[in-house]
Amino acid sequence: MDFSGNHILSIDQFERSDIETLFSVAKKLEPFALKKIVTRVLEGAILGNMFFEPSTRTRISFGSAFNLLGGAVRETTEVGSSSLVKGESLIDTAQVLSGYSDIIVMRHPEINSVKEFSEASRVPVINGGDGSNEHPTQALLDLFTIQQELKTNNKNIDKLRIALVGDLKYGRAVHSLCKVLSLYQNVSFNLISPDGLKLPKEYKDLLIKKGITIEETENLEQGISEVDIIYMTRIQEERFKDKQEAKKYKGLLSLNKNIYTKNCEPNTVIMHPLPRDSRKDANELNADLYNNPNLAIYRQADNGVLIRMALFALVLDVVEEINTNTKEVKWFTPHK
């Protein structure tokens, strides 16, 4: 893929070579993400951060990534604060906002909305999540995290054993992760979910077509034994038409220290795309795991900034210029 000037809308755009390119750039950007040195390579550039659905990590990490490259961020944080509430179309919004920005990140509750927006945009658009469809940058940062965590155990993504747990029906991070892992060899999936929240057929068909082994179960303890990665997810309550239906699934699949210790291999890594639902009736990832060294959720979140920095650098074609626009960090940071 030629990253320069292109939209990033779906994992379908990526081959393994593209991912290797992205991860290589990300590794080069680590000193900047850790604030050991500063680059101003995107000074004067503007990111339009258009979030028409709630977000904490994705929105702020995209903004931080752009700031760390020297750019400025302008953002909308909900439909109610934009002219969409007045009946403005996505096409009109794209035409106008792309005149104010050099690149746009968009999140929207409707499937394929970001694609529709991108078709009218005059600048590159990155999908920050479109309904229950896809979340490509989450999958890329998850894959990077998986790669880094497996390295510590002298393993790689080929031959990965992963358990996906929770809401596999509506979880867009899960959908994109399935797509990206289908690019690798001898991967096996344990799909752990209630019957009503199983992975949609289109994603199972894709995995089977790629020769990937799939096992489905509703039993958490059975499904998390003999895996390298446990990928926990919350119930996507906002995707349900009937909120009472969502509530019946809460708390059915909850991982805690006792279940982990009893069933998992010693180096099994725990991931979660966050937010974790910490309310008592849900609590899919218990706080008694917070001191477990295999809990990677915060390392995973940190990697979001790094991967998004790399995407900006590639799409705006400044990779070769980054080290020519550097200076020392003058303020306190824990990494100096």
Image (spheres, helix red, strand yellow):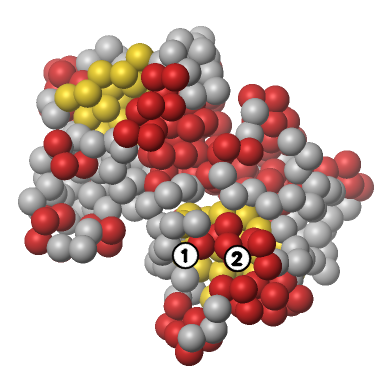
- Residue at (72%, 58%) from the top-left corner? 124
> In the rendered image, is residue 270 in sight?
no
x and y percentages locating residue 279 in the rendered image: 17, 56
Q: Nearer the viewer, residue 115 or 162?
A: 115
The span from disc 2 to disc 1 (Cα, nearest Å) is 10 Å
x and y percentages locating residue 293 in the rendered image: 36, 28
Q: Mark 1 and mark 2 in contact (Cβ < 8 Å)?
A: yes
x and y percentages locating residue 325 in the rendered image: 88, 52
The extreme bottom residue here reads 86
- In the rendered view, does 9 fall on the left or right side of 260? right
Q: Earlier in the sequence, mark 2 or mark 1?
A: 1
Q: Is residue 127 above or below residue 71?
A: above
Q: Is residue 255 above or below residue 267?
A: below
Write down the quadrant of residue 26 in the picture: top right
The secondary element bearing badge 2 is classed as helix
Identified by mark 1, the residue type is His
> In the rendered image, is residue 196 in sight?
yes
Task: Indicate which label's residue lies in the foreground, 2 or 1.
Answer: 2
- Residue at (64%, 25%) from the top-left corner? 16
- In the rendered view, does 158 fall on the left or right side of 45? left
Q: Which residue is mark 1?
A: 108
Identified by mark 2, the residue type is Phe
Quadrant where the image shows the N terminus: top right
- Residue at (15%, 19%) from the top-left corner? 222
Quadrant where the image shows the C terminus: top right
- In the rendered view, does 299 fall on the left or right side of 274? right
The secondary element bearing badge 1 is classed as strand
Q: Which residue is mark 2?
A: 117
